[in-house]
Image (cartoon, grey):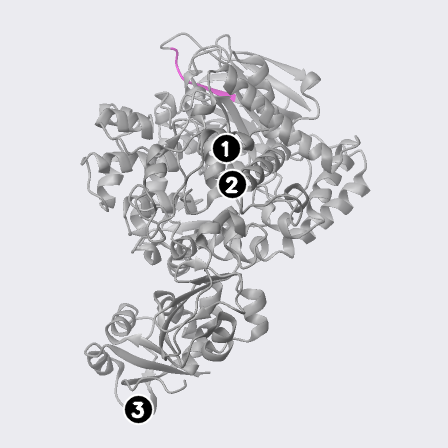
Amino acid sequence: MKILRINTRSRTYRFEDLGEYAGLGGRALTSRIINREVPADCHPLSAENKIVLAAGILAPTTAANSGRMSVGAKSPLTGGIKESNSGGQFANTLPKLGLLAIVLEDKPEAGSPMMDIVVRPDRVEFHDSVAAGMRTYAAQEKLLATYGKEMVTAMVGPAGEQCLSAATVQFSDPDGLPSRSAGRGGMGAVMGSKRVKAILLDSTAAQKVEYADEEGFKAARKEWVDIMRNHPVTSQGLPGFGTAVLVNVINAAGALPTKNFRFGQFAGAEKISGETLAETITKRGGKTKHGCHSGCMIQCSQVYHDKDGKYLTTGFEYETIWGFGADLMVEDLDDIAMMDRTCDEVGMDTIEMANTMAMAMEAGIINWGDGKAVIRELNKVGTDDPLGRIYGNGTAYTAKAFGVDRVPVVKNQALPAYDPRAVKAVGVTYATSPMGADHTAGYGVAQNVLKVGGDVDGHKKEGNVEISKNLQVATAAIDSLGLCLFVAFAVLDDARGVPCMAKMVETYTGKPFSVDDLIALGANCLKDELDFNRRAGFTPEDDQLPRFFQTETLPPHNVGWGYTVEELQGAKV
Amino acid sequence: MKQGPEVPMAHVVVPRTLAPAFAGLLRQGIGVWLPAPKPVRDFLVEEVGLELGYATHEIPGLFLNGVAVDDWENTLVAPGDEVALSGTMPGLAGIALRRQSPLRSFRSDLTVPFRSAAAVAGMVTLRPFNFVAQQAVQPLLARGVYVSGAELARYVEARADELGACRLMGGEGCLEDAMACWRQVEVVHLQVVWEE
């Protein structure tokens, strides 16, 4: 496997051996490259920043659910290091071209045209973009018509072209639609700053994957599939209702943030629940099961049709439904689906934009619960409308523009869909992750990592802090293998899970790789990220939830927060 | 249904193929008569009518008045309570919310404290979600539940196209007339005969 380095100023490229980066992949690779090669104090939109698109260590293999993509850079949203994770076909296709990662470097002169970069088996082509200024769905059609329908794409929408901090990198899904987002942290702005509209991979390439121990790998893969198939969450829960199955449950538990984190329950939850979503999809002829990448056996995604039975959106997640639903008090699922589609079209993060719209509601620009107004405002992003420029820079920026003081961000990144006062360890992760508030940063649950039944007492504050740290380590490891985080549910309950992941790596690479090595992979990744952030100027004071979580309790259970900055430091490796 | 309140009956014959259409009614909350406070597990088996094995293995999410239940053998359900049930749940929060989750300390503020309850009879609101609603809809409605008359009328009316094949038991009249009647009463006892 090689790394393809592209100089976006000179439009030149070179293929490099992995060298000092051998043994890494996914998030571990993006964070190591950024930490080593990008000045921590640089401007995120400057030529000094780089953006790395990396497949995971297991991406070249046939391991189930190993097609997740890591996108890393210094974030224009947080000012710290960022790894943003996405589905789509890109991670599966890179290894077919002999590539583990693509690094975009430098940046063209101001006013340079946007470019399309086409990566073929024998060469890399640079073209002035045929899709500049276009929204992603139209751009995708244009790109495929121009360069070939076999192309797999990563692109920015208008928000990325304008270098807005909530901009995503959109990846094409198995149906060829640009529906998958590396959403968090403004990676699209960094790609846009380098004047890259799209990177296209020729999916007809077919470089053979060499396994060090092919039979050993097949046995490990078989066990891996067995673990996924036999767990109720990965085999039943997620394929049945998608992640939105959580809406009713989290609402019942009083942990569904509502009206900008004022309440833990939303009266309209049933109307936007996973059950209602599944029933609506079925009635309209959509799909309740859909994979975000080839080789996914969980199929937690779906295809949502509008009232006329026409495709509207896919990848319609719990976080999006919560953010544009309960948090804004919108209870029309079709409106929320249109918001999701608009974010995909313009290329912006749904979590960030939902919280941004909450700021607009706090400021009285639009009314709580007015879904049509939210759609209208979202459509301003990526246009010449100055308000769109404000919104597109995210929650904290919009709050400042409108004089709002109830701002749900950590390290400038907006909070996801679990109220930290109700589920404490999630709050610890929001506060301490190098990524800013990120629900996926502490997801990688694993029995032997957690020492379940062992020496961690979660009923004590320090126990929750310790568990959050372990979860963050495990998550970083899973992200580095390129596995979908949802495998963590099965791994929690099946003692074979973690050893099986390590065995797949070992039999593929031929190098000894133990469970301890897997944990070290995650821990070292976090060390890279924390080191970068420290050099970028972050201090323990940045590891805090917004003040209102300290001062307000959450109805209906009236639970509070109560962790000090010092206590939270224990969650960092 | 044991010694429940005397309320108007809504006895309906429904083709079994239409059972999924009633899952949403369950999710909104249905009334189950409780003769006296009893542990959550016993309530589910004896009053709701679930098989113990099913309740044990297929309902990891168990909430009493919005907080997670871990010790279902000793936590009491009393009249006026709301019990919510969920099948398998994803997400870190989903894992933490499971009954007896190894991560239950994550939601230590959302755990039912020990309590006693006066020995009185009354209604408990049951809200089965997701798979539990799908799987329990037939036995629950066959056994009979209490629902708001107005809610029932609204629910059936909103699905008029879908539920056109439903009819009142014993040819007592059409559903439309019955709905007009249900709207006028606070609570009805809904019982369904599932037709092959």
Q: Horizontal and vertical percent for residue A45?
A: 42, 15
Q: Quadrant of residue A276?
A: bottom left
Cα separation, mark 1 vs mark 3, equals 69 Å
**Residue B115, placed above or below residue A480:** below
Q: Judge left or right: residue A148 versus residue A337.
A: right
The amino acid at mark 3 is: Gly
Upstream in sequence: badge 1 or badge 2: 2
Decide: few, some or many residues near mark 1? Use Cα within 10 Å; few <14, some 14-19, many ≥20. Answer: few
Query: Are the residues at dot 1 and dot 2 in contact (C-beta closer than 8 Å)?
Result: yes
User: What span is in magenta?
Assistant: A112-117
Q: Kindly identify which chain the residue marked by label 2 belongs to.
A: A
- Residue matched to label 3: B171
Evaluate whether residue A344 shows in this view. no
Q: Judge left or right: residue B190 versus residue A231.
A: left
Viewer-closest of A309 and B142: B142
Cα separation, mark 2 vs mark 3, equals 63 Å
- Residue matched to label 1: A567
Evaluate whether residue A254 shows in this view. yes
Viewer-closest of A539 and A210: A539
Q: Quadrant of residue A362?
A: top left
Decide: few, some or many residues near mark 2? Use Cα within 10 Å; few <14, some 14-19, many ≥20. Answer: some
Q: Kindly identify which chain the residue marked by label 3 belongs to.
A: B
Label 3: element kind:
helix
Query: Which mark lies nearer to you, 1 or 3?
Result: 1
Q: Are marks 2 and 3 on the same chain?
A: no
Q: Horizontal and vertical percent for residue B86?
A: 47, 62
The amino acid at mark 2 is: Lys
**Residue B1, placed above or below residue A560:** below
